[in-house]
Amino acid sequence: MTYKQLGKKIFTLTLGGLTVTIWDSHVHLFPKKLLTAIFRWFSRNNWEIPYKNLNLEEYPEYLKNMGVEYAFLLTYAHKPNMSMELNKWVRDFCLQYTWFIPFACIHPGDNNLEENIRIVIDDWDFAGFKLQLPVQQFAANDPALNAVYEKAHKRQKPVIIHAGTAPYSQSDPLIGLVHLKDVLHRWPELKVVIPHFGLYEVDEALAMVEKFPGVYLDTAWALGNPKENLPINYLAYYMEKYPDRFLYGSDFPFIEQSPEEQLQTLLNMGLSDSTRSKVLYENARRLVGRD
């Protein structure tokens, strides 16, 4: 595997003569103090993450060096009234690293929630929202989130919503795609990205792709993960059937495998050139209006 820069800002991955552009639709970066605390949580839960000791500026450097052209920057607020401070940090980070695309975090318990939503979307023009419901301990259909869905629907902004049970929420009654289905029955055109192929509810996630035109699945964390026995041929079939509805994402740096291994797995799935290009960058670019 070799990496090659073509031009001033266009980065591509070259593998066996195949050249592709990469957009990573699932990257987590935080202010250093908070990032360190998150890594400590992973260590306590026996995750061996090889990237935990990098300096903050080394994370974007790593992604650029492996060929990422653009990346979605996702944070999340684990308690009320910290969202706007995080969003300000995201805004500043994306002004410094202009190839990062900002997504807004909110907590359903935030004071001035609707005003915060207005600021990040209308004033700062963030690309969409990120909800991390297992951490925030809210169900996807909790009425406290209605303001997020209303704004996203009105402005045609995507909501990246971790509502599935992977990797640690199988017994949590607040978590599960059944709650997200309630949301989509109310806003059937809502643009929603379900991370991790919807694990551990892959069949349900794929059924939602079939039923709701705004539902996307990303590959983050799951693809190339040696701890997960993904039904690769089954997923490849659906990716060919619905080529506009899947996004490559890494979950970097909160992964135990490397993003390169994830990409290798994706490139080995036997996808058509057209579908592979859509998954690697075209769908993400279109989702945030950069096409």
Image (cartoon, rainbow, N blue to C red):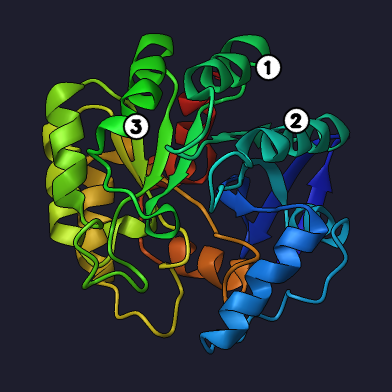
Q: Amino acid at mark 2?
A: Arg
Instruction: Give the percent coordinates (x, y) of residue 5.
Output: 82, 48
Q: Which residue is more in the foreground, 235 or 189?
A: 189
Q: Nearer the viewer, mark 3 or mark 1?
A: 3
Where residue 4 sits, quadrant-wise, is bottom right
Instruction: Give the percent coordinates (x, y) of residue 28.
Output: 63, 54
Q: Which residue is more in the foreground, 69 or 118?
A: 118
Residue occupied by mark 3: 145
Q: Amino acid at mark 3?
A: Leu
Q: Which residue is more in the foreground, 173 or 264?
A: 173
Q: Which numbered disc covers residue 91?
A: 2
Residue occupied by mark 1: 124
Q: Amino acid at mark 1?
A: Trp
Q: Which is nearer the N-term, disc 3 or disc 1?
A: 1
Distance, label 1 to label 2, CA atoms, is 8 Å
CB atoms of marks 1 and 2 within 8 Å: yes
Instruction: Give the percent coordinates (x, y) of residue 57.
Output: 88, 56
Distance, label 3 to label 2, CA atoms, is 22 Å
**Residue drawn 75% across the image and 32% down it:** 88
Q: Nearer the viewer, mark 3 or mark 2?
A: 3
Are there few (<14), some (14-19), or many (20+) residues within 10 Å of tag 3?
Answer: some
Q: Which residue is more in the foreground, 101 or 232?
A: 101
220 to the left or right of 245: right
